[in-house]
């Protein structure tokens, strides 16, 4: 089974379907990663320092027996490391047990206090997350670029960046981000943001491509109708829709049968979905179903459309 690929702006081919590892428990992710690589045919693992399971991801890679050169590994620099990106990368490389990454992303366009009261989620006395509002994202990006020049990462990109946030780094960028990883699915298609990314040569990636736990997407009447028409599962339709649009899909699971079907089902859907199906899925959000599931309580305006969560307010003096 051949996994389709998408060409990045530096010529690198990225597998269009990868295993997501967010919220995968350390005890479960070892077996999940090993199975995905050895048995299911995955070539792409998406991880992050902030997921707190990179060591276990690395162990899963080792247990798979698949050569490092055959695996596309992505990780991300967390907010408390924006002023020390190489240090963050070195931690990640040690965690995973490799000497390079295929892709390294800025996880969120938010710098957090590196000397705060928590290594990942520092907070202020008033309860808000301790954001360094003076930090320039362009300075984070300069450090990312230096890692490419050193050969420690092959490609660099961004995650959770709106147009507003991209415009804080692009004017001074020597290397254009290869990807922008976003919450993308038919309920949150972000058409205008994706058009901007494509105009800059930035490939979109989709996290939470099936929505969230107990997602209404999997029970959507239009999605189910299209699935029935083509003898597919609802998840196949949702993942296939992304890859047809040249969006990298990153479904997450620790269940072997689901890990396998997320790959085989996506590949089946790519060959079956027709123009009418795609147009119908493209229009779901505009028909009144727009819904973003992932909205952490950042005390910052990230510049996204349809970010419906209220700005967090101080809870104490």
Image (spheres, helix red, strand yellow):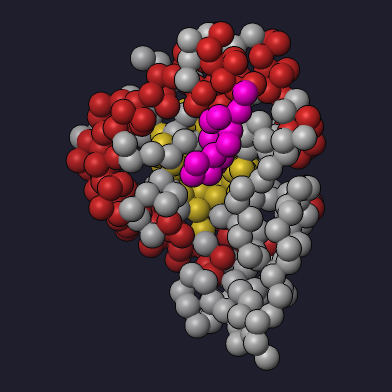
Q: What kind of secondary structure does the magenta stretch mostly adopt?
A: loop
x, y percentage for residue 9? Answer: 63, 32
Q: Horizontally, is 258 left or right of 237 in the view?
A: left
* Residue situated in front as seen by the camera: 299 or 137: 299
* Residue situated in front as seen by the camera: 290 or 201: 290
What's the residue at 79%, 32% (across, down)?
A: 286
19 vs 59: above or below: above
Q: Where on the picture, by quarter, is residue 38? A: top left
x, y percentage for residue 65? Answer: 20, 35
Q: Is residue 148 visible?
A: no
Q: Which residues are magenta?
A: 207-221
Q: Is residue 10 magenta?
A: no
* Residue situated in front as seen by the camera: 111 or 208: 208
Tally of marks: 0
x, y percentage for residue 52? Answer: 38, 60
Q: Where on the picture, by quarter, is residue 219? A: top right
């Amino acid at each position: 089974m051949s996994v389709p690929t998408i060409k990045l702006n530096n010529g690198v081919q990225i597998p269009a379907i990868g295993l997501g590892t967010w919220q995968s428990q350390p005890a479960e992710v070892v077996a999940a990663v090993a199975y995905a690589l050895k048995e299911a045919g995955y070539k792409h693992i998406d991880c992050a320092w902030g997921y707190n399971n990179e060591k276990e991801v690395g162990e899963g890679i080792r247990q798979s027996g698949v050569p490092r050169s055959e695996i596309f590994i992505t990780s991300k620099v967390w907010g408390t490391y924006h002023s020390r990106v190489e240090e963050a990368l070195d931690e990640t490389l040690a965690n995973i047990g490799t000497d390079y990454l295929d892709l390294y992303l800025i996880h969120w366009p938010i710098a957090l206090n590196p000397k705060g009261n928590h290594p990942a989620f520092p907070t202020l006395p008033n309860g808000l997350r301790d954001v360094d509002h003076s930090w320039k994202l362009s300075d984070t990006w300069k450090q990312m670029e230096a890692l490419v020049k050193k050969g420690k990462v092959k490609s660099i990109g961004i995650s959770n960046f709106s147009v507003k946030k991209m415009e804080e780094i692009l004017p001074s960028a020597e290397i254009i981000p290869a990807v922008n990883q976003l919450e993308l699915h038919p309920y949150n298609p972000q058409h205008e943001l994706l058009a901007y990314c494509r105009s800059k040569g930035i490939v979109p990636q989709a996290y939470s491509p099936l929505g969230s736990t107990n997602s209404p997407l999997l029970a959507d009447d239009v999605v189910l109708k299209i699935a029935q028409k083509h003898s597919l599962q609802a998840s196949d339709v949702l993942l296939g829709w992304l890859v047809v649009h040249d969006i990298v899909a990153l479904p997450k699971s620790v269940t072997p049968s689901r890990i396998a079907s997320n790959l085989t089902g996506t590949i089946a859907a790519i060959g079956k979905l027709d123009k009418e199906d795609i147009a119908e899925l493209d229009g779901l959000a505009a028909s009144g179903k727009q819904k973003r599931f992932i909205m952490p309580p950042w005390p910052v305006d990230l510049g996204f459309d349809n970010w419906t969560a209220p700005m967090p307010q101080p809870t104490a003096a």
